[in-house]
Image: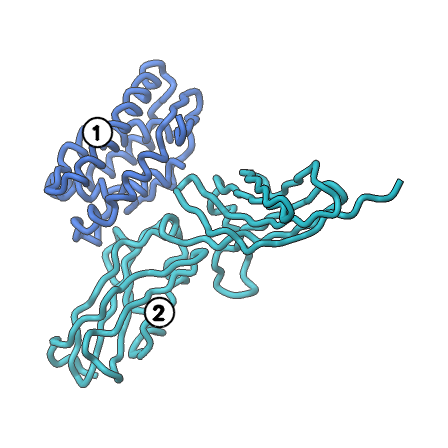
Chain colours: A blue, B cyan
Amino acid sequence: TAGNKIFHFGPCRISMSMTEIRSSFTAIKANIQARDPIRTLSILSHPHSLHKVKSSDRCCITHHLFNFYVDKVFKHCKTEDSYVNRKISSIANSFLSVKRKLEQCHKQNKCMCGQESAEKFKQILANYEGLNVIAAAIKSLGELDILLNWME
Amino acid sequence: SGELYCSLPNPRNVHFESINMKNVLHWSAPEGTGDGVLYKVKYSVYGVGKWIRKPECRNINRTWCDLSSETSDYEEQYYASVKAFLNGMCSDWMETTRFNPLTDTKIDPPMLSVSSTEKSISIILTAPEKWKRSPEGEAVSLLQVYPGLQYNVSVLNKKTKKRWFFSISNNTLVVPWLEPGTAYCVSAQIYVTTPLLHSGFSKEYCIATLKEKMA
């Protein structure tokens, strides 16, 4: 469909509605980021940037991150604004379908995990667990453009 | 000026204005304050602990501050903040929203070079350069920043008013099977899919195809 993009992670090929996700996020970005008052901590970009991940680890990190967003982020991001909530669930649905595709790749040994990706994801989880659940979820959601920029 | 008592109204509308990643902080003067207001500016990298003062924008009376150099790493995101001073009084620090150079910059239209033959027009498109610290600095095309960059090109037959649109990824376009001795006007836009960005259309470049040679 229009706006779908194919990502090649070695043998693992994933199609993802990137344009739809990006436009949904752009619509709520200012609202969500305004709910995150903590400037001094990032979930995804510090102390280690995603941009330093080796290409061989990209699939595994992406798999971890999509599980992370589906299991630990979207469900804790309910707001009082129904428009924002609709956009969040639209993004969540897109992430869920990509998560399943990555799961398939993982089962078929096309999305291998190495030591470095495990370390990398451990750091991201540590950043997340350094905050209370709601603050961590809202901050993670507000950093979606960091994830999307890195993926693309 | 010593900061005695921060009851001055706050600077308003503190925001980044970014074109081709030239990232300039802008704000409006506090309400109801005449001349004489001075400002200072600080910025921070999102996810890193400290605010950093911008010395060149300390005690300034203008309402902008060029932070292009400080925000040139477009893999990072930033906040900036402004404080106002007048007659020993000060305002609160007023912050921008989170600024992401990669997604929040505006892109200029492409530059065009147009030539013609009897029955065709050739168009060469050049994407603008990313802001650079000095004229001698290395030129980085926005094509390198946005690998998914494409061009939308419009070609208008001035006589028949018929218009064609082309969407291309490389930077040259040859439009064949045109009428000899006819004026055509060309305009182009940059379109980026990752992230979603597009420039305005360039101004029109008009050129005539050569007249048909007598047999």
Residue A106 vertical position relative to residue A143 in the rendered view, above or below: above
The crowding category of the residue bearing disc 1, from other C-alpha atoms within 10 Å (few below 14, some 14 to 19, many at least 20), is some
The quadrant in which the C terminus of chain B is found is top right
Q: Residue at x 19, y 74 (%)?
A: B31
* Chain of the residue on which disc 2 is drawn: B
Disc marking residue A70: 1
Residue at 51 percent across and 46 percent down: it is B144
* Residue on which the image places disc 2: B65
At label 1, the amino acid type is Val
Q: Is residue B140 visible?
A: no
Image quarter in which the N terminus of chain B is found: bottom left
Q: Is B38 left, or right, of A150 in this rendering? A: left
Task: Tell me residue A15's x, y (percent).
Answer: 38, 25
Q: CA distance from mark 2 to mark 1?
A: 40 Å
Res B21 → quadrant: bottom left
Residue pictured at 59% horizontal, 42% vertical: B162
Instruction: Provide the chain ID for the residue under circle 1.
Output: A
In this picture, residue B195 sits left or right of residue A143:
right
Q: Are marks 2 and 1 on the same chain?
A: no
Q: In the structure shown, which secondary structural element does the residue marked by tag 1 occupy?
A: helix
- Name the amino acid, label 2: Cys
Residue A25 relative to residue B9: left or right: right
Q: Residue B207, percent across and down?
A: 68, 52
What element does badge 2 sit on?
strand
Question: Which residue is more in the foreground, A117 or B58?
Answer: B58
Q: Position of residue A125 (x, y in %)?
A: 21, 36
Identify the residue at image location x=29%, y=61%: B15
